Image (cartoon, coloured by chain):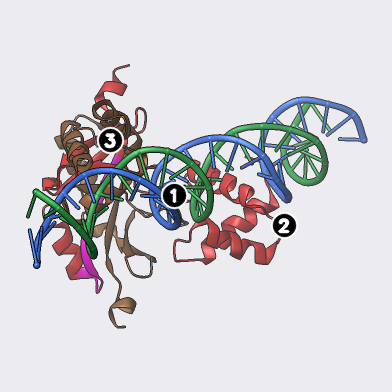
Chain colours: A red, B brown, C blue, D green
Amino acid sequence: MNYSRQREIILETLTENVVHPTAEYLHDKVKEKDPKISLATLYRNLNQLAEKGIIKKIDGLEASSHFDHNTFKHYHFICKECGKVFDISAEVAPDLIEKTQSLTDFTIESHDVVFTGICNNCKNK
Amino acid sequence: MNYSRQREIILETLTENVVHPTAEYLHDKVKEKDPKISLATLYRNLNQLAEKGIIKKIDGLEASSHFDHNTFKHYHFICKECGKVFDISAEVAPDLIEKTQSLTDFTIESHDVVFTGICNNCKNK
DNA sequence: TATAAAATGATAATTGTTACTACTTTTAGG
DNA sequence: CCTAAAAGTAGTAACAATTATCATTTTATA
């Protein structure tokens, strides 16, 4: 990864913003430092930086929503390879909400746990 | 909620598909039973059914991705009201990956926990 | 400093989802 | 039953977030 002034500004701006900004919000902030930085550059760099593990991209699943007829509490595993979503028993963390609620002042209504990795099927190829 | 044949087909089709289909995949399956059911109807019904708690919509965050310069393991809380994202210490579930890994055959690489609810600021309004 | 690789800005294209509109079904009450 | 109001639908336009394209510029290095 070569150096670029734009990337430096983007990273610096992200570090200043504690609130997990969206790309659009970041773009506004970044433009205050250099109005010529384009949205494409921003996305390109955010993805690259996330790829290298320098920053983290927060988005439970990829682009599109999935729907589930099983409303019983359970978690999910998404295969990076085939994109399939599998169920995981919620027993892996029985009192996660209670525990978290006792540590924060927020009113927690629900939660979602998403694991990512490689599923068996794809592993054996 | 009034009865509709379309909704019945959609729900039935969702129940037959264990793999947490996307809306698009579902639309294909639904069209096999009734080719006239439109994508808009599908989305409308999926959202309604999720609203009523009859099915579950899986999507970590809302529309857009958020970015995080803090790569240290931690979780997130999203306020339904203002949409802001807050950090939550990962200590609420210290050995979540290990525990889950021991119970499945998947190769887990990472995980994300997202709580939703109302933040203090919005609660006090 | 010449050159190949990497990065950029501007904008077009794509994708997933929602809004809109005119039309059809469903549901209660007379 | 019949009928009007409410709820639902198909089809398509609109939208928002993101990615692809491409001609130009910047960076690293031989």
Segment tinted magenta in the rendering: A103-115
Q: Give the chain letter at badge 3.
A: B
Measuring 29% from the left and 61% from the top, which residue is drawn there?
B89
Residue D5 against residue B35 in the figure, above or below: below
Amino acid type at mark 2: Lys
Spot the residue most to the top: A125
Q: Label 1 near label 3: C-beta < 8 Å?
A: no
Pointer 1 local density, CA inside 10 Å: few below 14, some 14–19, many at least 20: many
- Mark carried by residue A57: 1
Measuring 26% from the left and 30% from the top, which residue is drawn there?
B34
**Residue beneath label 2, please?**
A36
- Work out whether residue B51 or residue A30 is closer to the camera in this orientation and state it: B51
Callout 3 secondary element: loop
Pointer 2 local density, CA inside 10 Å: few below 14, some 14–19, many at least 20: few
Measuring 63% from the left and 48% from the top, which residue is drawn there?
A41
Callout 2 secondary element: loop
Residue A63 in view in this figure: no
**Residue beneath label 3, please?**
B21
Measuring 35% from the left and 35% from the top, which residue is drawn there?
B24
In this view, the mark in front (3 or 1): 3
